[in-house]
């Protein structure tokens, strides 16, 4: 017999969530991962797959010709790599390049960023645009202009300095020229990063310190720079990891690694092994070594960045 309700009784309220199947909720939890799937697929195809192939090629001898079979050689490529003098020389030149770029990626951007904070209104936008403009110039086009400026006979640089230096054909001046041109090219990016870091620092600390009698220099030294340290560590990380890559198009256009290998860094050395000497195994072995070495350095700098961020917070 079915139960009947009295005329004054309301029907019972049924909780829809209690009878709803849990399957839609589980499907909904997978939706965010579906958005990540295209990016992960591209990452696997364009990053992890080439890394795996590079690791495999480092154990074979191959001249990059499809008709020539790859011959397994074990660890011979790695053993031969460490006996080549240009390998150690390229590491040293890369270290010099990184040290030479640090003023352009850290020191000068901090000074420009601090000075730019005093510029207000539309002038600040114009000022930042002028500083950022060199990054918009294609490296090859910029290299062509610099080649004309550094001409030993009619170049504007020698005319201004009153010298006759052959900047691109002498070892010391060529390395200095690559550092300066690369620094000029990436300066706008570094200034933009520093400006973003300074924009995230509230003025409350500086105002409180000013009320206590602190000077502008003391505020910059003890408040602004420590709070900007995570940004500076990030720029240090970018300089260490990308310095050789930033300079590659300039080197390939202006000096081709010369004179006498004076501008050959690790990135250009990989290009030379693989596409000039047609020694894919040796180039892949060098790539694996550089990848592991820079990975360790990047891990240390990321750890330092996290420590600095925690300390500042």
Image: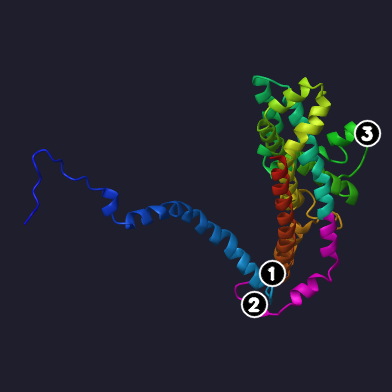
> In the figure, 102 relative to 281: above or below?
above
Q: Which numbered disc flags the more N-terminal residue, 3 or 1?
A: 3
Few, some or many residues within 10 Å of mark 2 (<14, 14–19, 20+)? some
Local SS, label 3: loop
The residue carrying pointer 1 sits among few (fewer than 14), some (14 to 19) or many (20 or more) residues within 10 Å by Cα, namely many
User: Which quadrant of the figure has residue 191?
Assistant: top right
Front-lying residue, 170 or 75:
75
Residue span colored magenta: 65-93
Hey, which residue is sitting farthest left in the picture? Answer: 1
Percent of width and height locating residue 195? 69, 33
The residue that disc 3 covers is 162
State how far apart marks 3 and 1 are (Cα). Answer: 46 Å
Assess whether residue 215 is covered by the magenta stretch: no
Q: Look at mark 1 in the image and give the residue it sits on.
A: 280
**Which residue is the site of mark 2?**
70
Which is nearer the eye, 23 or 36?
23
The answer to whether the residues at label 1 and label 2 have Cβ atoms under 8 Å apart is: yes
- The residues bearing labels 2 and 3 have C-alpha atoms spaced at a distance of 55 Å
Please say whether residue 181 is visible from this viewpoint.
yes
Q: Is residue 66 magenta?
A: yes
């Amino acid at each position: 017999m079915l139960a009947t309700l009295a005329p004054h009784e309301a029907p019972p309220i049924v909780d829809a969530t209690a009878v709803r199947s849990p399957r839609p909720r589980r499907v909904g939890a997978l939706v965010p991962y579906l958005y990540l799937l295209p990016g992960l697929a591209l990452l696997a195809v364009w990053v992890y797959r080439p890394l795996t192939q590079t690791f495999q090629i480092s154990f074979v001898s191959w001249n990059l010709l499809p008709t020539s079979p790859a011959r397994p050689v074990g660890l011979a490529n790695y053993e031969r790599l460490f006996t080549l003098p240009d390998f150690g020389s390229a590491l040293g030149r890369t270290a010099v390049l990184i040290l030479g770029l640090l003023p352009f990626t850290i020191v000068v951007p901090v000074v420009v960023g601090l000075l730019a904070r005093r510029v207000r209104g539309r002038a600040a936008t114009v000022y930042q645009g002028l500083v950022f403009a060199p990054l918009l110039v294609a490296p090859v086009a910029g290299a062509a202009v610099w080649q004309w400026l550094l001409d030993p006979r009619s170049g504007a640089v020698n005319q201004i300095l009153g010298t006759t230096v052959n900047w691109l054909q002498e070892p010391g001046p060529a390395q200095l020229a690559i550092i300066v041109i690369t620094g000029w090219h990436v300066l706008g990016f570094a200034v933009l990063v520093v400006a973003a870091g300074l924009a995230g620092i509230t003025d409350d600390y500086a105002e409180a310190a000013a009320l206590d009698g602190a000077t502008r220099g003391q505020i910059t030294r003890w408040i602004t720079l420590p709070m900007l340290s995570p940004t500076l560590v990030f720029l240090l990380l970018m300089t260490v990891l990308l310095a050789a890559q930033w300079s590659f198009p300039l080197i390939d256009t202006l000096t081709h690694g010369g004179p006498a290998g004076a501008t050959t860094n690790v990135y250009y050395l990989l290009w030379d092994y693989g596409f000039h000497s047609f020694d894919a195994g040796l180039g892949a072995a060098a790539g694996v070594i550089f990848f592991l070495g820079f990975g360790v350095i990047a891990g240390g700098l990321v750890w330092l960045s996290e420590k600095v961020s925690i300390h500042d917070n």
